[in-house]
Image (cartoon, rainbow, N blue to C red):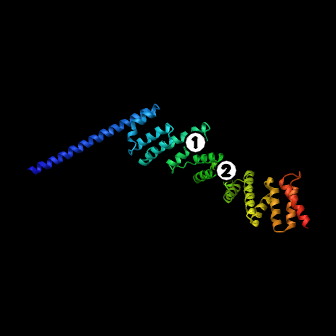
Amino acid sequence: MQLNQRTMMQKYQKFTCLSFLLVIALVGCSNKTERIANARKYIKTWNYDRALTEIISYRNVKDSEIQYLLGYCYLKKNEFGEAIIYFEKSLIASEAYKDSIISIYNNLAKNALKINEPERALFFYEEIAKLVPTYEQASNLFLVGDIHYDHGNYPASIQAYIKALAIDSTSKQARRVKQRMVQALFETNRLYEALDLAQEQYETLKTAANLLQLNEIRFALGNYLFDEGLLDSAEVFFELIISIQEPKSLLDDAYFLVGEIYLKRNNFDKALEAYKKVLRLNPYEKGEVFRKAKERIKEIKEKA
């Protein structure tokens, strides 16, 4: 009999304890819900400090909504470092607020562009990339690339353009960006990559602008190979420019360097022929290339 009473007492104590814990949990849950509601109310009136006081005690709770609201308040207070910490926690807890976070940063970036603050826009787009690496909206990446390009940060522009073109390589925006990417590759001395893309662009579009860009790269590669002593390869690029006769601004340089290649081979007749073409291209007898060609002709004639 005593054993049954003891068992009954133990069960009663467990039930009482569980009931007490359940009440505490319900009270806590109710209190948290109320705090969240209060925080949202203060957010609507732009009182972000007051909203924070309502929910800051829950900053270590794995609750997507609370972490999102904390991040939102800090973002509105321009405390971007704090904001991204809480947005990250929100996304770790769940992706319920992912679209909202993306939308917030997108809108901030667009507003920055409206008031001509591209660096601020770039910052917000890069924050999206940190928070949601899987979110790769091509237009945003094109814009990031353009901002870097306009500021002369060509390596960063190339990275953005590559990511954007992996998503969209056929739109009008993509075609425009490819020409910029060629130039960015050219500016960073990635000449063979620039050449491949420039050739692809010219074969597709056949415009004078594409041809000019392509031959400028060919000339740069010819120059590089000439400086490295790879004369046969250099000659190929210079002869391509000569055969196309474009761009006119580089023709005399191409002929002069072909003359230099023949001179290094001791082929004086061919060198003389190339130098004379430089003179014929300069009827006003002006410019550094004209002067150098004239000197070379004189040197060859003195040796003869």
Residue at figure coordinates x 73%, y 51% from the top left: 209
Q: Secondary structure at mark 1?
A: helix
Q: Which residue is mark 2?
A: 180
Q: Nearer the viewer, residue 137 or 288?
A: 288
Amino acid marked by disc 1: Ala
Residue lying at 54% horizontally and 39% vertically, measured from the top left: 108
Q: Position of residue 52 (x, y in %)?
A: 42, 36
- Tell me residue 122's x, y (percent): 58, 44
Side of 124 where 57 appears, left or right = left
Residue ID at (55%, 45%): 125
Mark 2 residue type: Arg
Mark 1, residue position = 121
SS at circle 2: helix
- The spot of residue 265 in percent (x, y) is 81, 68
Give whichever of discs 1 and 2 has the lower sequence position: 1
Label 2 packing within 10 angstroms: few (<14), some (14-19), many (20+): some
In which quadrant is the C terminus drawn?
bottom right
238 left or right, relative to 114: right
Q: Is residue 198 above or below residue 304?
A: above
Residue 245 visible at all: no
